[in-house]
Amino acid sequence: MKNPIKTNSSFRALALPMAMALFAVCLGRSAIAAEPQAGIAPERQKRLELMKSKGPDASLTILPVRLGGKPWDRVTEVVGVLLEQQGLRNIELGTTPFTPADTNWESLATAVGAFVKANPITTGYALYAEYNGNHQTGLNELRAVVVDQTGAVVWTDRQTPQDEAFKKNDAREPMTMSVLLVERLGPQLGLNEETAKAAKPGKMAAIMDERSGLPPANERAALPERQQAMKRALPAATLLVYPARIGGKEVNVPSATNIVRLLSQAGLCKAVLADQSVLLKTSLADPNELKALWNLAREFRDFVRTHPPAADYALYADYGFNPQNSEQGFVHFVVCDRKGEWVIVDLQNSHWPDYQSVGVTSCARCDQLLVKRLEGYLK
């Protein structure tokens, strides 16, 4: 994300479970250890120790996270998911934003406490966080405050580019800033590597799945085994290749011909060109790219079930590209077996290494990336 505080569309990656893999890597790259807060009042230290002693059983309301001065529900949800992945079980998402009256760091914690007194929470604690910055520098400050149900301050933290934790995370965009926040807060909640290992998907994961457009987990669970079955069936298995959809508006027969040629050259399978073109109707209007992919997957699954292929498998691709800018584009594709069951559902855009390695600026480059991805699944 080149400009993390400019537009809502910049946050499509926040809804992607693939992005959560990035968070998991960042959170796991070093042991999480609590840092004692020096110079705090004994009463506050007692409150902090009490919260820490509750561990995963503590209950927390995450007030809407402010990003560049505005509350963002998607960022708030991501913080919730990250804390849930670290083991926190009882998380609520606040709906009423807290708006600081001024930018004074020293008075922020007291103001958050007063807000919670005026807007009671049902959990034991409330978290307020803000990610500050501007369009030129990106994000350059994290402020976080935890208060208890009475509004008493429990924990505060402020990180800037001068701080080692900020530097380590390169916290210039919402994803890495959220990782930094959870790295700092997790130990104060008694969360650690052991609680993370024991963590189970809960309410936050369900919200993220709904946002992403992912089908239920039981519908996705069979994909790895189906991929292995397809792998075992190669190279004798036949793959019917439909012309790719371009920009959601037209299909491209030469693309399908090129894919068949590339697959034959690779000796991956017996690829054959479909004798009909199909323009699927799935919209690209939603900024959530993963949701668009899975909507396409559902539509193609339904098509295959009503039009069984004279082949072992069928492939449909969806492309978007800018001839002048390889950073703007995507390659989505779906492979179903002859029964219409999903085998591969794949998304590539400029965030991913394979996409970057190909430099997608044309339909032919999209074809090349698709075949590269197929080989990765099946070889």
Image: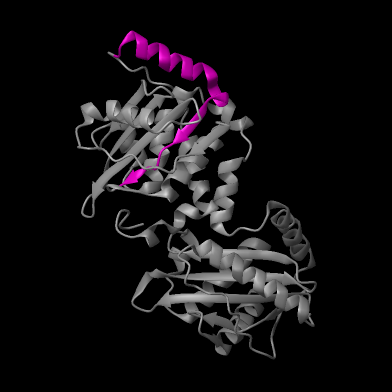
Q: Quadrant of residue 235?
A: bottom right
Q: Quadrant of residue 347?
A: bottom right
**Image position of 259 with respect to 170: above or below:** below
The C terminus sits in image quarter: bottom right
**Drawn side of residue 133 relative to residue 195, left or right:** left
**Image position of 177 with respect to 230: above or below:** above
Residue 269 is at least partly visible in this image: no
Q: Residue at x 33, y 39 (%)?
A: 98
Residue 21 is at least partly visible in this image: yes
Along the line of sight, the residue nearer the viewer: 222 or 217: 217
**Image position of 34 with respect to 15: above or below:** above
What percent of the width, then of the height, locates residue 362?
A: 44, 80
Along the line of sight, the residue nearer the viewer: 326 or 196: 196
What percent of the width, then of the height, locates residue 57?
A: 57, 24
Q: Residue at x 26, y 38 (%)?
A: 100
Along the line of sight, the residue nearer the viewer: 326 or 140: 140
Range shown magenta: 40-67
Q: Is residue 82 magenta?
A: no
**Drawn side of residue 218 relative to residue 125, left or right:** right
Along the line of sight, the residue nearer the viewer: 38 or 255: 38
Q: Residue at x 36, y 31 (%)?
A: 118
What percent of the width, then of the height, locates residue 257?
A: 60, 86
**Drawn side of residue 269 relative to residue 144, left or right:** right
Q: Residue at x 62, y 40 (%)?
A: 201
What percent of the width, then of the height, locates residue 375?
A: 62, 66
Which colour scheme appears in the figure? one colour
Residue farthest along the bottom direction in this orientation: 275
Residue farthest along the top direction in this orientation: 42
Q: Is residue 46 magenta?
A: yes
The N terminus sits in image quarter: bottom left
